[in-house]
Amino acid sequence: MSERSRAGRGRRAPAEWWSFGIALAILVVVVVGLAVQIGGEAPAHPVVAIGIAVERPDGTFEVPVEVRNDGDRAAAEVQVSAQLVTPDGEQTGDQIIDFLGAGEVQSLVFVFTTDPQAGTFSLGVTSFARP
């Protein structure tokens, strides 16, 4: 090779440097975006909210419940348990929601033979699976 072709090889034109800089910036944006998206997801977090008990014509009481997933990931087999303790005894109920997506809300109804206001009522998510 001649002296001239070797000397010309080492220099980059300004357009090449600009192209390299833009490509590098795009690569950095993509990598940072993926890192934020992967690392920013909160785990599933099912929570319950209780409504007001309503007496049915047959003398039983319906207790409406909403289950909401406050996490960024889904939950499966979400078990919601309710317990009513009165002077007459204890009543319990369990329900399972097959799948609860991120931000999703499901409505449930628990039925008791005694007015929940006549005793101590407790409610909560007792377990769930990570699909």
Image (cartoon, rainbow, N blue to C red):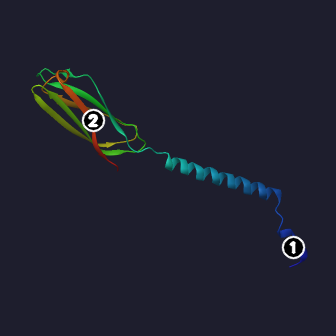
Position of residue 14 in the picture relative to residue 72 (left or right): right
Numbered label attached to residue 50? none
Is the residue under label 2 in contact with that under label 1 (CB below 8 Å)?
Answer: no
Q: Indicate the amino acid at tag 1.
A: Ser
Q: Residue 98: which quarter of the image? A: top left
Residue 45 is situated, as x and y percent measured from the top left of the image, at 37, 40
Determine whether 51 is above or below 48 in the image. Answer: above
Q: Nearer the viewer, residue 111 or 123?
A: 123
Q: Secondary structure at mark 1?
A: helix
Residue at image x 21%, y 28%?
A: 121
Decide: is 90 above or below 24: above
Q: Residue at x 83, y 68 (%)?
A: 10
From this viewpoint, which residue is outermost toward the front?
87
Compare marks 1 and 2 and give the one earlier in the sequence.
1
* Drawn side of residue 127 relative to residue 45, left or right: left
Check residue 124 in the rendering and tell me which mark sits there, or answer none.
Answer: 2
Q: Secondary structure at mark 2?
A: strand
Instruction: Residue type at mark 2: give it.
Output: Gly
Camera-nearest residue between 83 and 79: 83
Q: Residues within 10 Å of mark 1 (few under 14, many from 20)?
A: few
Q: Is residue 54 above or below residue 81?
A: above
